[in-house]
Image: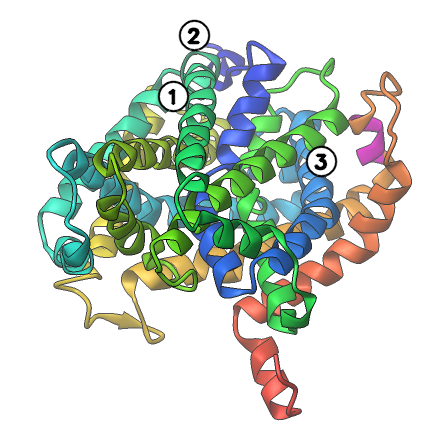
Amino acid sequence: MNSQSNQRGQWASNIGFILAAAGSAVGLGNIWKFPYLAGANGGGAFVVLYLLMIVVIGFVIMLGEMAIGRKTQLSAVGAYKKLNEKWAFAGIIGVIVGFCILSFYSVIGGWVLNYIGKYVTGGIVGSEAGAYFGSFISSTTAPIVWHFIFMAMCCIIVLKGVSGGIEKASKVMMPALFILLIGVVIRSVTLDGAMEGIKFFLKPDFSKVTISTVMAAMGQAFFSLSLGMGAIITYGSYLGKEENLEKNALIIPAIDTGVAMLAGLAVLPAVFAFGFEPTAGPSLMFITLPSVFDAMPFGQFFGILFFVLILFAALTSAISLLEVVVSFVIDIFKIERKKATIGLATIIFLVGIPCSLANGPMSDFLIMGYNFFDFMSFLAENVLMPLAALSMCIFIGYVWGVDNAIEEITSGGRYKFVFKKFFILMIRYVAPVLIFFIWLNAIGVLPAIAKVFGIQL
């Protein structure tokens, strides 16, 4: 494995790519964030808007990123640079996003590992769930140890390469995630009182829709699919020319959306059944659900199942983020995979330490009013991810050109491009505008403008 191509690797099968790319998309955003956003934004109406945005934004951006990656057979920075040297910055943004997100994502992954251990050894008393979570994340040593273990798991998988590590792990974890999730769904929807949660989640009430609901649905659709972080470009660069990109760009968002819908059915019926608030927000996973499991028959068992599936979701996303950075170093600096992976995993782990301490000893250390954990999240998800995706739309629509993108998508005419006109319309006009508004909303500009003009969001 001395050649550069071997260092980069290639997918052994298309199903391996689909599961890995879907694994990159399926993460905490689906199983943790989606249910609480649906709960906070009126349930069914939010779900309908989310599904619409997956079609409008998700399919188009994912297809564009795949095309850039496969065309160049390079990671995000090298891909843009090969097609137009002046646009290397768009790839650099994606690499920075991957680095920043993994630094705090790994900390959350450590929390999940801790909760698995806690449930294996007895579970969490419902009345103590809030106090336990607050005490754990604010402590100094334990969260960092778990953060290290999670980062080491990611490192081991990525060390084994594309087909030997990422693909094999995804082929195990993604089907296991579905099986575990379905098991939790069956238990949740059969609880007494669960029907109210099902109705809330699936029955749209458009009278509750506001501009904020629309923006939340747009943002969740965007972030849920791992767009704008170089992951899909990098994974796409390991694809052969015989693969049908359009089909893949339909299947992956469909899997991602399926997991999000199942997660909603796993969480919200149980929350309603036991009288908790569906608007609990980020605390839903670590405080509300442990209280639900404590009140549920066989709650310890289902607590283990739930947090194991959360672990699989977190790992499949985290390895894609690490691969983005590793692939960049391999392509640009010609460093072998082993050195690149271990070195970068170590650096990301070290950056993750202040992210962890931000919830405790370093909580008073603020950047722009954010603690270090929240600042890394704001920088990556609110500022840089939308910019990377917006740059890609402009690049394909007006720099590289839609004709060149279509040539790659169809593999030089091998495949018919069913949604060609839709793709052109979206990538050149609709998606850039929507992403621009997502960005304005995410960084707080849109709410500020609305306040000046007296508009109620």
**Residue 96 visible in image:** no
198 to the left or right of 243: left
Q: Is residue 359 left or right of residue 306?
A: left
Q: Is residue 406 visible?
A: yes
Disc ID at residue 1: 2
Residue 407 part of the magenta-drawn span: yes
| Vertical side of 414 occupied by 73: above or below | below
First in residue order: circle 3 vs circle 2: 2
Q: Earlier in the sequence, mark 1 or mark 3?
A: 3
- Residue under label 1, please give it: 337
Residues at marks 3 and 2, CA–CA distance in whole angstroms: 30 Å
Task: Name the residue type under label 3.
Answer: Leu
**Residue at image x 74%, y 54%?**
431
Q: Nearer the viewer, residue 129 or 348?
A: 129
Task: Report the residue at 17% width, 60% height from top.
Answer: 134
Which residue occupies the foreground of this view, 339 or 56? 56
The mark that comes first in sequence, 1 or 2, is 2
Q: Which residues are magenta?
A: 404-408
Q: Are marks 1 and 3 in contact (CB under 8 Å)?
A: no
**Label 1: few (<14), some or many (≥20) within 10 Å?**
many
Please state which amino acid type lies under the numbered disc 1: Arg
Q: Which residue is mark 3?
A: 63
